[in-house]
Every structure is written in C-alpha cells, then in structure tokens.
Amino acid sequence: MNPEPVPTLRILAGTRAAVRLAEAAALRFADRLDVAVALSGVGAPPHGCRVDAIGIGPAVLGQATAVIDGLDPFAREAVRSVREAARRAGIPRLTFRPPVWHRHPLDRWVEVRDLDGAVGAVASVARTVLLALPVALFATLGFMLPVATPPNAVIFGSGAVEIGQMLRAGVILDISGILIVAGIVMTLGERLLPPALP
C-alpha cells in the first residue's frame, strides 16, 4: 500500500525574512509538509528546507499544494507573474511581507517626493555614494563559500565541487574582483557622479 503523498508548500524567498519563514515552516511542519524553496536575490539558503529553484517565475510553482509569496515587494513584475500563475493553476497563495523599515535615531534619511527628487538628492550626497558604491559591489563577490550565494550552495550541494576547490578558486576571484572594482570606482567615480551641490 502506497503512503499518502505529502503536500508541497512552495515558498518563494526573496527577502531574509522569507528565508526565516521557510526555516520556521520546515521546523514546525516537517512531518506534514514538504517545504520547497525557490530563492530570488537572497544570500544564504534556508536550513532544513529543500531548495530546488534559483530565480522566480511561473514554472517554479510546479506541483505545489500552496504557495507563500515572500518576494521583495519592489520586484513588481515577479510578484505579478507569480500571482497570475497561481491564480491560473488554482493554487492557494499567501503573500508574506516583512515589516516596514522604521526610522532609527541614528539614521540619516533623505526624503524625496518622487524619482526626480531622488536624482537631485544624489548630487547632494555624491561623496557618500562614491564610498558606498564599492562596498555594495564588493558584497556581490561571494565566490569562496557555499553559503555566499544560492548558486554556490546548489553547486556545492551537488557534490561535484569540494570546499577546498571553492576556497582556492574563490580567493583568486574575490581578490581580483576587489582590486578591479576599487580601481574602476575610484578612477571613474569622480567623473560619473554629479558634482556636489554648493
């Protein structure tokens, strides 16, 4: 006699909060649900879950019994396509959104009315942007460890690459990337960013 199939809960994780939700769901419902995660733009994969897709699209819904949309709310096109695909397939969909950001007393927010205001505000904080830009780009240079990016985790999980191989190749790529990014930003940054307002 075949056992009853376990329903699949598909979690589309596009934020760290959605990754934590997937871990909590896998921990709490491990005996009743197959928690399958599709990662989109987050760093480390969740523990205790089956990560079987990188990127988001209607195809990742597969044979899911239910879907939790934990995508970044600013990824409007992905959110819309998943909503439509779930509706067409008749799959129940729950939207999970992390709490909104709250201003901290040490934050220095520059509030603007619209996109034109944001463009104008960049000129007033050009020096800060010049320093923050390489830091943001350095954060994308995660080549050394399996937990650095979802593709690294998938490759490492396949067993085709060992941790030593990743470390050796990753050190070379990371150091090269840091030198290249820093060089480009420091030489071209002054020319590309608008001048600071008086």
Image: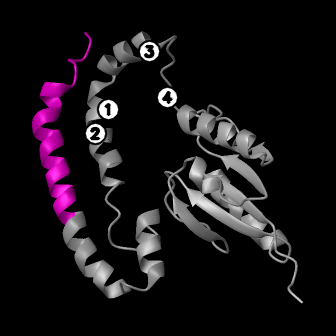
| Label 4, label 2: how far apart the Cα atoms are | 16 Å
Q: Are marks 1 and 2 in contact (CB under 8 Å)?
A: yes
* Label 2: which secondary element: helix
Which residue is labeled 2 in the image? 131
Q: Nearer the viewer, residue 25 or 167?
A: 25
* Label 1: which secondary element: helix
Q: Which residues are magenta?
A: 175-198
Q: Are marks 4 and 2 in contact (CB under 8 Å)?
A: no
| Label 3, label 2: how far apart the Cα atoms are | 22 Å
- Residue 58 spot, x, y in % from top left: 59, 47
Closer to us: mark 4 or mark 2? 2
- Residue 131 spot, x, y in % from top left: 28, 39
Label located before the other in sequence (4 or 1): 4
Q: Nearer the viewer, residue 150 or 85?
A: 85
Q: Name the amino acid, label 1.
A: Thr
Q: Main secondary structure of the magenta part?
A: helix
Q: Name the amino acid, label 3.
A: Leu
* Label 3: which secondary element: helix
Q: Name the amino acid, label 4.
A: Arg
Query: Quick check: is 188 in the magenta stretch?
Result: yes
* Label 4: which secondary element: loop
